[in-house]
Amino acid sequence: MATSRATVVPMKVAQMKAAQVPKPGADFEIVERGIPEPGAGQVRIKVQACGVCHSDVLTKEGAWPGIQYPRVPGHEVAGIVDEVGAEVSAWKKGQRVGVGWHGGQDNTCRECRRGDFRNCRNLKVCGISYDGGYQQYMVAPVEALAAIPESLSDVDAAPLLCAGITTYNALRHSGALPGDLVAVQGIGGLGHLGIQFANKFGYKVAAIGRGPENAALAKKLGASVYIDSQATKAAEELQKLGGARVVLATAPNSKAMSELIDGLGPNGTLMVVGATLDPIEVTPLQLINGSKRIQGWASGTPTDSEDTLRFAELSGVRPMIEAYPLEKAAEAYARMMSGKAQFRVVLTM
Ligand SMILES: [Zn+2]
Ligand SMILES: [Zn+2]
């Protein structure tokens, strides 16, 4: 067999930057990686912006079972379809898309067969099950894609894909009707959006924060009442207003949540979206009197994301953000973890 002695020139794979977590608990590292190719049923997204969510701690610290490392976090992704894989017909190159927490369902489990994709038993999570948005390009299955309306900027759309959809979806499924008293506990990444959505839904909004410093901002965001939980007993203040139909609990503080159960009115619901591992404490009698309930809510599907984005476009609800370049992912993450960000931290590529 004849062999040529021609020099082999290695194929140069186009490179991109990514902020990856090399192993659980390790610091972020900025690395060069080959730009990934989309497989069947997937698209490649040129990431424009990615929000930094507190749940990224699951990837950073390895607190979610089965994560393979190195892993790129990020589930508040706004970008442009850059390439489509085989068998993709509904999404086109150049289209603006987002990816949130819901990173794809299996379409075969009992919940999926019922159309309850949000509760898929084998739900994939962007930035946990596969590499997320802390990078210049990422690949996502079409089940994870939400279309972004033209009038929303990338940095505004990104936080709406987790913090936004979570508060919007929890409120619209909470049973509160226009005119009802709805309290929003916590004025942070979730809460500052929750107050705006609650106001635009036509609720009477009571914002509950710690200390007087957020009172003016809460009112500007649409609260008609501000309750300082350090200066007063928030539950009693809510009862003076007739009791809340819903308390949207956004700050991950189980003790503060427990104290608000007595602020609910008849048929009231404590709607829990702030994720924490400590128990909420409640006696059966607290729930029995007035038929009260405690409910949790997780994010939503990409079509819920599209509803959130369209409603934000329609109503003017926007996140307040602090933007950092991708290279400063570690600093951006530390800022989010400090709890001092006003209010969502967003990486730009
Ligand atoms: Zn999130
Ligand atoms: Zn499923």
Image (spheres, grey):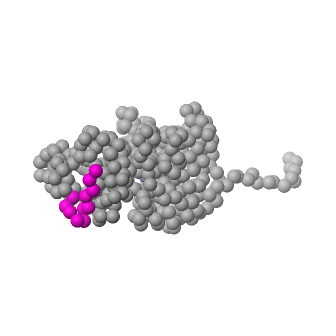
Left or right: where 74 falls relative to 230: right
Q: Residue 20, percent across and down?
A: 55, 60
Region in magenta: 224-235
Please tell me whether residue 326 is drawn above or below residue 47 in the rendered image: below
Q: How many marks?
A: 0
Nearer to us in this view, 253 or 37: 253
Q: Residue at x 57, y 50 (%)?
A: 48
Report if residue 47 is visible in the image: yes
Q: Residue at x 42, y 58 (%)?
A: 343
Residue 232 sits inside the magenta stretch: yes
Q: Quadrant of the C terminus?
A: bottom right
Q: Residue 144, percent across and down?
A: 49, 42
Residue 171 sits inside the magenta stretch: no
Q: Residue 312, percent across and down?
A: 43, 43
Nearer to us in this view, 157 or 204: 204
Nearer to us in this view, 136 or 212: 212
Q: Residue 238, percent across and down?
A: 20, 53
Quarter of the image where one finds residue 9: bottom right
Please tell me whether residue 174 is drawn above or below residue 14 in the rendered image: above
Q: Residue at x 31, y 59 (%)?
A: 215
Left or right: where 119 falls relative to 161: left
Q: Residue at x 52, y 41 (%)?
A: 151
